[in-house]
Amino acid sequence: MSSIIQTQGLTKVYGANGTAVHALRGIDLTVAKGEFVALIGPSGSGKSTLMAILGCLDLPTDGTYTLDGRQVQGLSGGELARIRNEKVGFVFQSYNLLPKASIARNVELPMLYAGVGRKERRERALALLEKVGIADKADKLPGTLSGGQRQRVAVARALANEPALLLADEPTGALDSKTGAEVLGLFRELHQQGNTLLLVTHDPSIAAQAERQVEIRDGLIAHGEGAA
Amino acid sequence: MNTSGAFRERLLGAWVEIQENLGRSVLQAMGVLLGVASVLGGFSISDSQRKRADEMFVKMGGLDKLNVQPKAAVRDGRPTALQQANLGLRDEDAVGGEALKADAIHGVSRQKFARVRVVSAYGDQDRQISGIGGDFIPANGYGVARGRAFSASEMDTGAPVVILGTEAAQVFFPKGDALGQTLRVGSVPVTVIGLFEERVFRFREGQRNQFWWRNRIIAVPANLVQRRMNGDAYRRVDRVTFRIPDLGAMGGFAKQLSDLLKANHRLQEDFRLDDVAARIRRRNSQGDVYDIIFLLSGVLALVGGGIVNVNIQMAGLKERVREVGVKMAIGASGREIFKGFMTEALLLTALGSLAGLALGVGFSWVITKSLGIPLYMTPASFLWAYGLAAAFGFLFALYPAWKASRLSPMEALRYE
Ligand SMILES: Nc1ncnc2c1ncn2[C@@H]1O[C@H](COP(=O)(O)OP(=O)(O)OP(=O)(O)O)[C@@H](O)[C@H]1O
Ligand SMILES: [Mg+2]
C-alpha cells in the first residue's frame, strides 16, 4: 500500500514562550492513495493548522511529514512552492480566487507556474471547467459568480496540475445546504475517479460520506488515525 | 520551461494590474515622468545652446584655426637691439609651417593690414584694409557674391584690385554699381573686381547681426599692401592662419610650429600663437554647469519619485497581501512573486518614461523657442534620461518586491 500522507509527531506552536499556543501536539496520520478522509473536530482544535502543514503552506514546529514519498521538512521555499504547485490542490472555505483575473485565467495560473504552454493551459482550463460544470463562465470575473460556482472554479484550479492530494478546508462552509451538497457531490465524483481527498468539515452528514473520519481534539488525533 | 511565455504573462498581468489601479499607477508614474522630462529637457536645452555656439564658431571660421601674430611688445614698444634685428612674421613662416604637417592643414592664409585713406566719388574715409593671401576667403567664411575672387597671379604680383564687403560697397558706391569702378586706396587706384556676400549671424532670433563688422572688409592682395602701402623688405605679415579641422592634431602642430618659428627667428619669441589647449577646454566645457544642474534636478526628481513610489507600493502591498498568499498557495514561488512585482514597477517606469520623453521634447521646444534658438536633441540625451529612469525605477522597485516575495503563504492568506 502506498501512502500519500505520512506524518509522525507533527507539532505546531504559534507565538513565543509566554503566549505560546500549541495548535498541534503530535499528529501521526497516514492517508493512503485514493482515500477520502474527513477531518472533524471542534473549533480551534487545529484542523486548519494541520491542513496548512499538509498543504505545505506552513511548516511544522517539529515532526516529520512525507508527501507522496517526498520528505517535506528541510526543503527550500522554492521547492515547497513547487510541491504546492504540482502535488497539492487546495480548496478554501473562502474560495480565494484572484478577483481581477478571469475564471479561465484563475484556473490556468497553477499551470503557468508549472511552465505549461499558453495553448495547452487554455485547453486544460476549459476541460476542467467543463468537468466542474461551469464551462460557460470561462471569461467572466469571479465577482459575477455565485458562491457555489466560485467553489467549483476553486476545485477546477486545485485540479489543474493533477495533484496527488486534494485538500479542502470547509469547502461548503460558506454555502447553503443545497449548493453545499452539490459541491460535495463533485468531491465524491473526484474520489471515484481515483483522487486522494482530505476534507475538513463541521457537518456530520458530510463527514459521514467519507470513507474514514479522523477526529482532532486539542491538537491530537482523538479517533481514526490509521489508514483503513 | 517556456520562459518567453512566462514573461509575456507577467507583462500582461502587470498591465492588467496597472489598469485596475489607474489612479495609483498614474501617481507612481508621475515621479518618473518629471525626472525624465527634466533630464531630457535640460540636456536638450544646453545641447541646443552649445550647438548654436558651435555654429557661430564655424561661421566665424573659428575653432579649427590657429592664428600666429607678431607679439604686441615688439610691434609697439621700444624693441631691444636683438628684437630689432629679428625677422618678424613672414611669408616664409607660413610656407614653413604648412610643410610641417601638410596633410592635416586644410589651408593657410596670410593677412597684412594697413590703415589708409580710401576715396571714391561718394565716400572718403580713413579705413583699415586687409591685404589677404592664401585661402583667406573660404577659410574665413567669406564668399564672393558678384564678380570674382583674386587670381593666383593677382595675388602674386600684388595687382591693384579690390573686393568689397557689403557695408564698404554701400559707403563707397551707394548706387550699387561698384563692380568695375575704381577706388583710391592710399595713393593706389584699385579696381573693384568682386563683392562679398553679406555676413549675417544672430545667436538668437531678433538679436543684432553679430557679424556686421565683417561686412566692412576692403580686401586687396596682401602683396599689394606689402609693396605699395605698408611693406618692408622682409615682407612681414600681420597674421598667418592655419586651418586644421582635426582638433586633435592641432595641439601637436602648435607646439611644432612654435619650435620652428623660434628657430627661424634667432630664438626670439616675437610671435604669439593662439592658446589651442584653452580653446579646446573652453569648447568642451561649454554648458557643463547646466548639464550638471539639469542632471541633478532630474536625479532628485527621480529619487523623490522613487521614494514616493516605495511608499505607494508598500501601501498597495497591504491590499495585495491576500493576492500574494493565493498565488503562493497555488504554487507561485517567492521568486515568481518578486518578478511579478518588478515587472509591474518596470512597466510603470517604462510608460512613465515614455510620457516623460514626450513632455521633455515639448518642454525643450518651448524653452528654445522662447530663447530664439533652434532645438537640437541628441540620442544621448534620450538614452541618459531613459537610462536614469530605468535605473532608479529598478532600484526603488526592489524593496517592495522583495518584501512581497518574503511573505509566508499561510500568513498572507490569513491577512485581513
Ligand atoms: N497564526 C496563528 N497565530 C497564533 N495562533 C494561531 C494561529 N493560527 C491558529 N492559531 C491558533 O491555533 C489553534 C488552532 O487553530 P485552527 O485554525 O487550526 O483551528 P480549526 O480547528 O481550524 O478551527 P475552526 O474549526 O474554527 O476553523 C487555535 O487556538 C488558534 O487560535
Ligand atoms: Mg479552521
Image (tube, coloured by chain):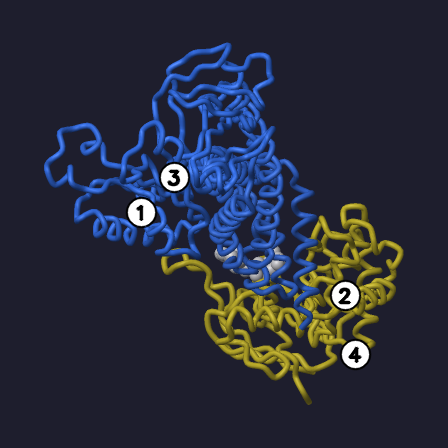
Element type at marker 2?
helix
Dividing the image into 4 quarters, which one contains the C terminus of chain A? bottom right
Asked if disc 4 is less than 8 Å from ligand 2, the answer is no
Label 3 and label 1: CA atoms lie apart by 10 Å
Q: Which residue is mark 4?
A: A194
User: Of B412 and A63, which appears nearest the observer?
Assistant: B412
Element type at marker 4?
loop
Q: Is residue B279 left or right of residue B368?
A: left
From the rendered image, report the letter of the chain displayed in blue.
B
Q: Residue at x 59, y 45 (%)?
A: B319
Dividing the image into 4 quarters, which one contains the N terminus of chain A? bottom right
Label 2 and label 3: CA atoms lie apart by 77 Å
Chain at numbered mark 1:
B
Q: Is residue A133 left or right of residue B393?
A: right
Identify the image quadrant of residue A79.
Answer: bottom right
Chain at numbered mark 2:
A
Q: Which residue is mark 2?
A: A118
Residue type for callout 3: Arg
Residue type for callout 2: Arg
Q: Are there few (<14), some (14-19), or many (20+) residues within 10 Å of tag 1?
A: many
**What is the number of the mark on residue B93?**
1
User: Of A183 and B104, which appears nearest the observer?
Assistant: B104
Q: Residue at x 67, y 62 (%)?
A: A169
